[in-house]
Amino acid sequence: MRLTLKVWRQAGPADRGGFRTYQAHDVSEHMSFLEMLDVVNEDLLATAEEPIAFDHDCREGICGTCALMINGMPHGPKHATTTCQLHMRSFHDGDTITIEPWRARAFPVLRDLVVDRSSFDRIISAGGFVTAPTGSAQDANAILVPKDQSDLAMDAAACIGCGACVAACPNGSAMLFTAAKVVHLALLPQGQPERSRRVLAMVHQMDAEAFGGCTLFGECEAACPKEITIENIMRMNRDLMRATLRDRGDREAEALA
Amino acid sequence: MNFDANIPGGPLDAKWDRHLADLRLVSPANKRKFHVIVVGSGLAGASAAASLAELGYRVSCFCFQDSPRRAHSIAAQGGINAAKNYQNDGDSAWRLFFDTIKGGDFRSREANVYRLAQVSANIIDQCVAQGVPFAREYGGMLANRSFGGAQVSRTFYARGQTGQQLLLGAYQALERMVGRGSITMYPRHEMLELVIVNGRARGIVARDLVSGEMESFVGDAVVLATGGYGNVFFLSTNAKGCNVTAAYRAYKQGAGFANPCFTQIHPTCIPVSGEYQSKLTLMSESLRNDGRVWVPKAPGDARASQNIPEPERDYYLERKYPAFGNLAPRDIASRAAKEACDDGRGVGPGGRGVYLDFASAIQRLGEPTIRDRYGNLFEMYERITGENPYRTPMRIYPAAHYTMGGLWVDYNLMSTLPGLHVVGEANFSDHGANRLGASALMQGLADGYFILPYTIGDYLAGARLEAVDASHASFRAAEQRATARLDRLLAIDGARSVDSFYKELGHVMWNECGMTRNREGLQRALRRIPEIRSEFWENVKVPGAAATLNQSLEKAGRVADFLEFGELVCLDALQREESCGGHFRTEFQTADGEALRDDAHFAHVAVWEYQGTDQAPVRHVEPLDFEFVKLATRSYK
């Protein structure tokens, strides 16, 4: 098939950037979206223009590196699919496809379609862990975890940190990302000792990184390639409220618990 | 070159404990005086960085990805082995050790492998304490499954995302120490040179991939956790960014490179669909627990799978290896698939594929059970191929996946260069000529959590290190080397893209040095690779500048190294005149087509020493002594 691509080009963080239009010929439906871009970049070599910079690595939907806004949808039109796993059979001959980077204040553009998502690392660094120094662990079966609870924790832990939730959110909020980690650890016995401290620290950091607030649009859930549900945000909000009140020594918090 | 492996004496099961008691310690107050540079943030790198920081060392950790959480360990699907014997099926450290030695076709060190089996149980404990959501039974206990090359169920897993969950555990431990100020993380940085001062590894030169700036980092020890070199084949299951550059540059500075020809071809990957193909996707080996591999009995049978009746199907793994059936080790399963396709019995476009069929498992267990076990893998298969594996069998074909070879290390995981330690897939130590499934995660975490943190202390306690800073002549020279190389790449301004050379190299490597090898083909490759390389340096086009984010330049540097390193892989394959594990020389096989080892001449590690540009490297030998197991012919029949 033959496609017209409108691609965001930006030489660097300080550049204003803008759209450029390219033609892609001989696109096979079996190509992945990124393979289609590889071919466009090979063609650009023959011109004076530099190849389009875009982030990608594993190309099997798990590393969370690829991050393209395709026709206004993070990772494109296919449900529960990262950009690298999106195949050209989802498009039609003659289509015009608009490709942009993630748009969010907390994800500054570095070049073309590449953004800086280190704010996510800082949220994890603030509290997204269990303090379990190497060597201090007891036997793995000493603490039992009910299967359904463990499965729920795994659902949340499946987050790949791609940032689609932020890109989809009209507020640029990182609630779904933050909630996924908070809830993963809050559902497990190992996460209990730091449960309150964790949620407070992570939400505080999220705010400090200039992510927006959550007004429950639900766009994040729709965009998430790993189907992390908005239920996690409810669970995190409950933990956050309890932790906040407890922080003030409020008795009501005990009742909530 | 010094190849003393420093293996402690005594009985096999007491070696590590004895060694631990003998290792020198660094006092808590002195630990913070030492700065350790860790390159790579996968399972081995992140676990090492976190553990070293917890001990009190100052750590700097580097990765080329935008976040340490994205290292390629994240893509491991199936699981992690540990000798817990939770299933009461007779597992033990000895059995895991023996399976690993045998699976590696008796080309690994007994002492290292035994230690790996010993610490495997601690890894599971550690990961559970971090909150890794392993699969569980209804009673709340951890679940296990079986994996290729083993007759016990010792594999722990987190759906089909075990690598992801283990890496996130290590990443979170790392980020905790970043938050406490004891690790400085350098994402989007690529190591381009190792710096040696007075014979010891004292730092690295890395390029900031955003600004393009070249920077020197000085440390008291350097740890490479930079993964394997499977991308030398161009098409592999590795992430696009995986490369040999850090390890190869260390080799050029004098670190011995061991067994580069030991590469693993994984039997269950999605077949190539066209020339534009950029990578291959693995379908977890765990699928072979319930999937049955087959091809039509008749060559050229082009009927759709459902139209081929049972008696006309050849379930060749079950036929040839009745004891292990579809769970035969990877090297054997891969070669068997190639043979079937070479016979003209392959399926799908181009005839390079075999079926992995779940029909009988679905019939036996029901679709919901299969969905529960492999749902995400089936979805992934459908997304890529557009076919529904619940209805039609998957098509699979082998692809380059893992590299057992790597930088030579001793029992302390130190390379031939004092101060340079190598962990995870980047070293050569534990898997011999073939790695068993679910053992890569085990080894990466064993090295990072439970071995290196002890052994590096011994080095630091014993080394008398002079004060050095980045103005030292060795650092200046290394910076100049790295900068000059990039400038040279940009200045060529030829007519061909980096990828066109890369694909050409990949074709040569796959055809001549892939699943099967022979003298003639390897000699052909050894003539061809230097030709490709010299054309690369005359005719490649690398657009853009050095002082910006320039992905073409990053790739060009990595491909330039693969163009040299590929030759070393072929040379090693040529000189190892036997078949063992993943290294199958067609000249050396038994009457029924199995690998024919030559223990009299090749029961050793081949270690290559760099001699300079355009000089043939020297092949050294570390003999492998088998004191505790009897060398035997592997049989999975």
Image (cartoon, coloured by chain):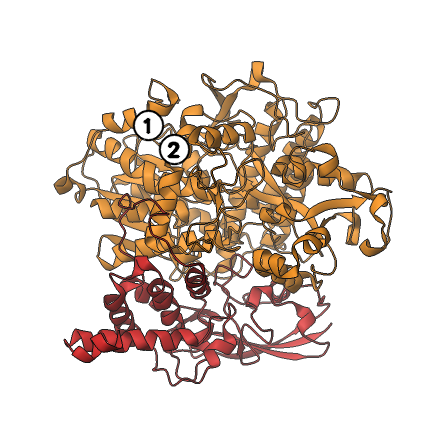
Chain colours: A red, B orange
Of mark 1 and mark 2, the one earlier in the sequence is: 1
Q: Can residue B498 be seen at all in this image of the molecule?
A: yes
Which amino acid type corresponds to the residue marked 1 in the rendered image? Trp
Q: Position of residue B229 (x, y in %)?
A: 52, 42
On the rendered structure, is B24 left or right of B79?
left
Coordinates of residue A251 in the picture (x, y in percent): 17, 78
> In the drawing, does residue B99 fall left or right of residue B213?
right
Q: Quadrant of the N terminus of chain A?
A: bottom right
Q: Quadrant of the C terminus of chain A?
A: bottom left
Q: Above or below — where is B471 with respect to A72?
A: above
Compared to A79, does B519 lie above or below?
A: above
Choose between A142 and B9: the one closer to the eye: A142
Q: Residues within 10 Å of mark 2 (few under 14, many from 20)?
A: many
Distance between the Cα atoms at labels 1 and 2? Answer: 9 Å
Between disc 1 and disc 2, the foreground one is 2
* Label 2 residue SS: helix
Is residue B479 shown to the viewer in this render?
A: no
Disc 1 chain ID: B
Up-down relation of residue B195 to residue A36 (above or below) = above
Q: Residue at x 73, y 27 (%)?
A: B593
In terms of image quadrants, where is residue A11? bottom left
Element type at mark 1 = helix
Residue drawn 57% across and 17% down?
B599
At x 51%, y 35%, the residue is: B404
Percent across and percent down for residue A117 are 39, 67
Q: B224 or A237: nearer the eye? A: A237
> Which residue is denoted by mark 1 in the rendering?
B16
In the rendered image, which residue does mark 2 sit on? B118
- Measuring from the top left, give residue B624's x and y in whole percent: 47, 20
Whether residue B315 is situated above or below residue B270 in the rendered picture: above
State the residue at coordinates (46%, 82%): A218
Marks 1 & 2, CB-CB < 8 Å contact: yes
